[in-house]
Amino acid sequence: MNNYFSFVPIYNLFIEKYMIKSNPSFVIIYIYILKKSINGEDINLEDLSKELNILASDIIKALEYWQSQNIISYKQINNKVEVIFFEIKEQNLQNNRDKKQELDNKDKTYTDEEVTIYSQKEEIQQLFRLAEKKLAKTLTYQDRKILIALYENYGMSLEILAILFTYCIENGKNNLNYIEKVAIDWCENNIDSLEKVETYLKVYNNDFKTIMKFFGILNRAPIKKEEDFMKKWILDYKMPMSVIEEACVRTVITTGKASFEYASSIIERWKEKNVKSLEDIKNLDNEYENYIKSKKEEKQKRVEQTFKPNIKSNYGKNKFVNYKQEPLDYELLRKIEIMSLKEGIEDND
């Protein structure tokens, strides 16, 4: 039995508190997937993309957004998505407000008295010594305030801060204001353990440099926008470096330049086709070549049919029947025959 519902039930709170402040395309995706879930339909990213005319990557962004709002939970398995819709209550909104308050607390600044108090803590003193050793400088009062905030507000351990100092210094940045920005970026991306830091450093120190080389860029570090593209390919899409390299090569050959936007469009198409290896790319190329070949053959056949001469068969007929024949002059023939007879008689005489 097909339990197909003719309507989609939507909480009033969703309309009043979520819909009016959210990206319109995210709202469309939420309602459409809710409709499919209620009716027990499979949720396929490729199908959704075609039906809504929205990129699969944007559908994932929408799901991530609604998950961050605590009203759904989703899991992606290859090209399929499993979504659980939660009951929307005031508690969801309170949780979101608590998260905002937590972020606001991270921006807390310290008074002179608080700086003095925190500076007496053993862990903070260790942090000051570590920073002075790594940065090879005596800390200013403002430096100390920054370090206290990183340790107390953002909850960064001494081990992670030590790695952070080393990372920034190796990249030629020993300014604490710059180090603070990197630390905040790590926190916002939930890089809060040694394991996550190691993954991050692998991406930034190894993978980023490798991709820049794929583009032939050897004399500069990537800008923020380029980093965002590369993070998406590596961390979000989890594309192998061999596939990323192929996209970069095709980009340079086609455009004549290192266009991260163009390369990303290639990688996004491959992701939608579930490409995981160079062999997958080869198969896609073959499919495309066969498609183009078949289209050319169809076009050639249409041309031949259009210009093919319309020849009718004349089997059993004289080959000259198509020529216009003049009517016979029988009187002239009779005179010629009489003259021939006379000439014959005279010759006999």
Image (cartoon, grey):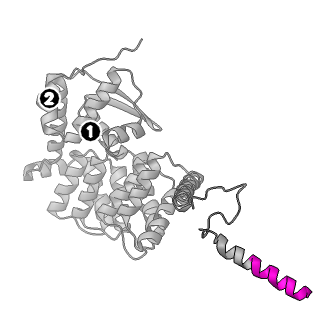
The one nearer the camera, 215 or 329, is 329
Left or right, 144 with reference to 84: left
Q: Which residue is mark 1?
A: 65
Give percent across and percent down for residue 128: 26, 57
Q: What whole-number distance in Å separates the C-alpha atoms at marks 1 and 2?
A: 16 Å
Quadrant for residue 20, please give it: top left
Give percent across and percent down for residue 289: 56, 57
Q: Tell me what residue is drawn at x 40 percent, y 33 percent.
A: 75
**Kind of residue at badge 2:** Ile
Can residue 97 be seen here? The reply is: no
Q: Residues within 10 Å of mark 1 (few under 14, many from 20)?
A: some
Pick the quarter of the image with the C terminus.
Answer: bottom right
Query: SS class of the residue under badge 1?
Result: helix
Residues rendered magenta in the picture: 337-349
Q: Is residue 120 magenta?
A: no
Q: Which residue is mark 2?
A: 15
The one nearer the camera, 57 or 144, is 57
Q: Tell me what residue is drawn at x 79 percent, y 81 percent.
A: 340
